[in-house]
Image: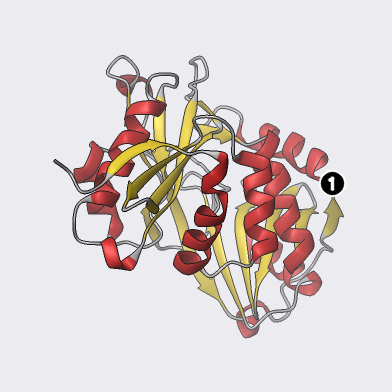
Amino acid sequence: MSEWTLRSWREADLPALRSLWANAFGDDEAYIRTFHNLFLRPGSCIVAQAEDQVVSAMYILEGPLLFPPADTAMSTAYTYALATDPAWRGRGIGTAVYHACVASALERQDAACVLPAEPALYDFYAKAAGASPVSYAREGTVLPEDLAGLARNKAQPVSAGEYFLRRKSLLRGQPYAVISGSFLTMESYTMKRFGGGFFSVEGDIAAAEMDGDTCRVLELLAPGGDWMEVLAAVAEKLPAKAYQVRSPLFMPGPEQTRPFMLAAFRPSSAARMPKGLWWGFAFD
């Protein structure tokens, strides 16, 4: 008989879930409570219980809609924030929790997506549930001195609603994910609390948030312009010691590319999703 069991979360698990999250990811109580208020619903978290305590957990969020070109939208779940108590690691518990999350997600959705927190975890998710890369990104770090004299236009702050209308227009005809609802609310909360915002630069757009003295440009879309000029304009609004920039493969951006999002699919859905999908925002 297993020394631990899997089940859906219960209201009585909330203190344990907060403690597990804080110990694993270092976020404070206000951030964790905001996340739980937005996303915790019946069936939205699977936990492993051992010795009457929660020792591992992962969340199953209603994810973005994926739009392959010339196809109908695909529904997704976003499996997120896998955490296991250090005392219980190495026993296959995290693997079992993730596998159960994927199985639950694929009962209702076309795909179960996950964003590994570090490159070493890509193999873990691939082996645990057959997830494979479908989303890629241009990614790189730019220093302030690289941007000197490049800001030819001003970055204009825009509302989240304005930003996502422009985003839809810029990405039309490409494989991309539509972010809305609680995802957008959580991202707006993070930007408001830590600094950042949504910006338009002569029609091009960027969304950025501060992480200490680093500015994380979660999405920079400049299909017809100079992405460095767009970044320079954003840098005038958000001074930082370094800028971590992410753009789609099919638009100008940093030279380095990497796998971004992994997904496991229903058998009937896998063939519909082309590689090269632009996911964009994620809680990473």
Task: Please provide percent x and percent y for residue 206.
Answer: 69, 54
Q: Could you say which is closer to the camera, residue 23 or residue 221?
A: 23
Residue located 51% across and 14% down the image: 72
From the viewer's perspective, is 251 left or right of 199? left
Does 171 appear above or below 159? above
The amino acid marked with disc number 1 is Ser
Quadrant holding the N terminus: top left
Q: Could you say which is closer to the camera, residue 104 or residue 49?
A: 49
From the viewer's perspective, is 37 left or right of 48? right
Residue located 56% across and 63% down the image: 245
Q: Could you say which is closer to the camera, residue 205 or residue 25?
A: 25
Q: Could you say which is closer to the camera, residue 186 or residue 101?
A: 101
- Residue 114, quarter of the rendered image: top left
Task: Please provide percent x and percent y for residue 25.
Answer: 49, 66
Residue located 43% across and 63% down the image: 255
Task: Please provide percent x and percent y for residue 52.
Answer: 37, 50
Tell me the element at label 1.
Answer: loop
From the viewer's perspective, is 200 left or right of 254? right
From the viewer's perspective, is 165 left or right of 244? right
Does 109 appear above or below 80? above
- The residue at the far front in this view is 52
Task: Please provide percent x and percent y for residue 182.
Answer: 68, 38
Q: Is residue 226 visible?
A: no
List the residue tagged with mark 1. 159
* Count of marks overlaid on the render: 1
